[in-house]
Amino acid sequence: MASRTHQQKRKRRNHQAEMSKEVSLSSLSDEQKQALIQEFLDKNQGELIQLVAERITEYHSGPLPRAEDFEAYEKAAPGTAKAIVAMAKREQLFTWGHRYLVHGLRYAGMFFAGCLAVYSTHRGFNLLDAGKTGVGFTSLGVLISTIVGPFIGRAIIAKRASDRHRDPD
């Protein structure tokens, strides 16, 4: 194990020594530049592939494990990968159903609140028309304060959200 580490260190030192040789690219012709790049790629192809693979796996994120992890789960307990995928599908279905319920109930609530506001407005004007001005104005005042409150609150919340998400340039 120590010899392998020693070999890796020696290889890294040699690589650094090669890289430290300064070459003025402006003094080279295009063909020499291409040859130099090709030589570098030929010498370091394995390391470049490994570096790219490490970077790709390093940035993996998502609801499911990486393919290599699925293989490890299958080796440890056969059938685990299928169970994980089935669980992810069930969770996704639940999430979509839950979103539908939340948004559907919100829109239904808005609709019925609008109907109630129209009815209350009509009722308030009927009271005013019937000569019961005290009750009519009180009814309309309560209605207006009840309707205006949420609109002002929603506007304040929307402004705070836009301030939080604004790009600080």
Image (tube, helix red, strand yellow):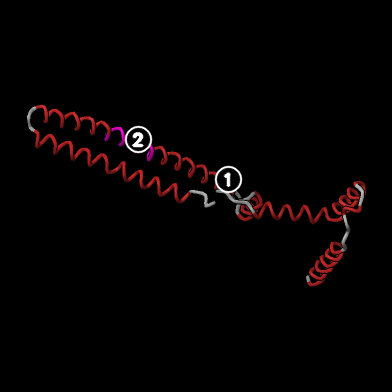
The amino acid type found where label 2 is placed reads: Tyr
Q: Quadrant of residue 47?
A: bottom right
Instruction: Kindly identify which residue carries mark 2.
Output: 107
**As drawn, 14 above or below 108:** below
Q: Nearer the viewer, residue 19 or 24?
A: 24
Front-lying residue, 141 or 81: 141
Where does the image place residue 161, in percent across and percent down from the top left?
A: 42, 48
Q: Disc 1 and disc 2: Cα gap in Å?
A: 38 Å
Q: Which residue is mark 1?
A: 82
Query: Does residue 50 appear to the left or right of 36 in the view shown?
Result: left
- Position of residue 5 in the picture relative to residue 57 (left or right): right
* Residue situated in front as seen by the camera: 6 or 70: 6
* Mark 1 or mark 2, whichever is nearer to me: 2
Residue type pointed to by label 1: Lys
Q: Which residues are magenta?
A: 101-113
SS under mark 2: helix
Q: x, y percentage for residue 81?
A: 59, 48
Does residue 166 appear to the left or right of 155 in the view shown?
A: right
Chain-order first, disc 1 or disc 2: 1
- Number of on-image labels: 2
Q: Which residue is outermost to the front?
A: 169
Q: Position of residue 51 (x, y in %)?
A: 74, 55
- Quadrant in which the N terminus appears: bottom right
| Mark seen at residue 118 | none
